[in-house]
Image (cartoon, rainbow, N blue to C red):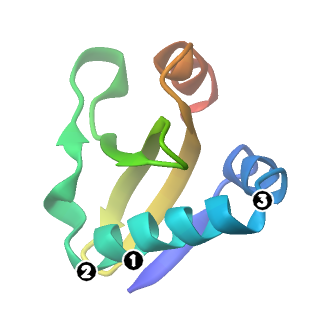
């Protein structure tokens, strides 16, 4: 599985602590094994899937897009607050 990272995803990961990165790695591996795990979005976010997971007892969202069968583009990660608003602004 090939994973692509966007310019909005990378800075979010760099700000995380080691334990948070481990939880994120588990979520990314789960998506890599089964890309249909996330919830498909409609409307402005058509084609985007969002996977919900826990990041140190806090619900967190991971947005991604399946480009081709073996390629996943990681768009954004963060808490639910303003997540979809920011995703609409950055999703291209």
Tell me the residue at 44%/44% (across/down). 63
Tell me: 60 left or right of 46.
right
Residue 53 image position (x, y, % from top left): 37, 48
Whether 92 is drawn above or below 85: the answer is below
Q: Which mark is drawn over residue 7?
A: none
Mark 3 or 2: the one toward you: 3
Tell me the residue at 45%/46% (across/down). 62
The 10 Å Cα crowd at callout 2, few under 14, some 14 to 19, many 20 or more, is few
Q: Quadrant of the C terminus?
A: top right
Q: Mark 1 touching mark 3, by CB under 8 A?
A: no
Residue for badge 3: 17
Q: Mark 1 touching mark 2, by CB under 8 A?
A: yes
Spot the residue most to the front.
Answer: 57
Residue for badge 1: 29
Based on the displayed image, in which of its 4 quarters is residue 5 positioned? bottom right
Task: Compare marks 3 and 2 and give the one earlier in the sequence.
Answer: 3
Whether 71 is drawn above or below 50: the answer is below
Mark 1 or 3: the one toward you: 3
Residue 33 image position (x, y, % from top left): 25, 80
User: Which one is in front, 60 or 72?
Assistant: 60
- Separation of marks 1 and 2 at Cα, in angstroms: 6 Å
Q: Which mark is drawn over residue 33?
A: 2
- Separation of marks 3 and 2 at Cα, in angstroms: 24 Å
Q: How many marks do you count on the picture?
A: 3
Tell me: 87 left or right of 53.
right
- Separation of marks 1 and 3 at Cα, in angstroms: 18 Å
Based on the displayed image, in which of its 4 quarters is residue 66 positioned? bottom left
């Amino acid at each position: 599985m090939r994973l692509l990272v966007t310019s909005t995803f990378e800075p979010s990961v760099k700000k995380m602590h080691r334990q948070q990165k481990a939880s994120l790695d588990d979520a990314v591996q789960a998506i890599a094994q089964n890309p249909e795990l996330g919830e498909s979005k409609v409307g402005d976010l058509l084609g985007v899937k969002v996977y919900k997971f826990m990041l140190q007892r806090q619900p967190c969202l991971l947005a991604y897009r399946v480009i081709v069968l073996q390629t996943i583009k990681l768009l954004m990660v963060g808490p639910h607050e303003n997540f979809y608003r920011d995703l609409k602004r950055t999703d291209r």
